[in-house]
Image (spheres, grey):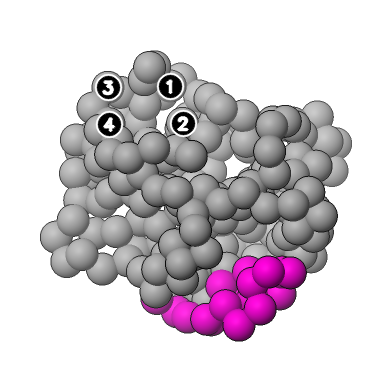
Amino acid sequence: MIQRLSALLLPIILAACAGGEEIYAPIDDVASRAYVHGGPSTLTLYTVISNASNKGAHTSLMINGPQRVIWDPAGSFKNSGTPERGDVLFGMTPQMLDVYIDYHARKRYRVVEQVLPVSPEVAAMALQIVQSEGPQGNATCSLSTSRILARLPGFQGFPVSYFPKKTRAAFAAKGASQRVIYDDDDDQNDALIGFPGRHALGARG
């Protein structure tokens, strides 16, 4: 069920893979928002794709391990419920994940969500790596994410690429399940995120 979530949002501006800003929320804020999802350990790749050009616009990686976070390199998502340190978004509860997806899905963009089960050890290693990376430069979302994946056990030889759709294809080849999320929100939807209108194809896995 899609619920109205706009009350959770800070003023935000969409800019795909256009970060580079150094943001380090206080450790106390990060610790107080830490969220442990439970369930199987997974890596979830998010790829934002233009509906007009069919080109990739952004790549991010959700890690469900000792806690659930999103590695959002050069991302523009900002919310008080998900304190950020060095391009890592903490406090990724189910509700905040819904906000994150709604922020990126809109008339001009769809979101591909790919879920891949991994061992607890791999998830813990991925969490450790993203917390050590720091803020990434503009247009490096796919590059930095694919580099991180290539360092993980079971991902040896994972192709490193600037292109989100290439990273998505390589992640799919690992056996990830997939769903595609469409939304009819206006392109300037910072005040509309979370409104009804999302349409998902496929299964979460």
Spatial CA span between label 1 and label 3: 10 Å
Image mark for residue 198: 4
Label 4 SS? strand
Q: Which residue is mark 1?
A: 5
Q: How many residues crowd mark 2 within 10 Å: few (<14), some (14–19), many (20+)?
A: some
Magenta-drawn segment:
146-163
Three-letter code for the amino acid on which mark 3 is drawn: Pro
Residue contact between numbered discs 3 and 4, judged by CB atoms under 8 Å: yes
Spatial CA span between label 3 and label 4: 6 Å
Residue 157 pos. (x, y %): 60, 82
Which label sits in the foreground, 4 or 1? 4
Q: Which residue is mark 3?
A: 196
**Residue 24 visible somewhere in the drawing:** no
- Location of residue 155 by image quarter: bottom right
Counting residues from the start of the chain, the first of labels 2 and 4 encountered is 2
Name the side, left or right, on which 14 lies relative to 34.
left
**Residue 64 visible somewhere in the drawing:** yes
Q: How many residues crowd mark 3 within 10 Å: few (<14), some (14–19), many (20+)?
A: some
- Location of residue 182 by image quarter: top left
What residue is at 74 percent from the left and 69 percent from the top?
Answer: 153
Which label sits in the foreground, 1 or 3? 3
Residue contact between numbered discs 1 and 2, judged by CB atoms under 8 Å: yes
Three-letter code for the amino acid on which mark 4 is drawn: Arg
The relative height of residue 20 versus residue 14 in the rendered view (above or below) is below
Q: Which residue is mark 2?
A: 98
Residue 135 pos. (x, y %): 65, 66
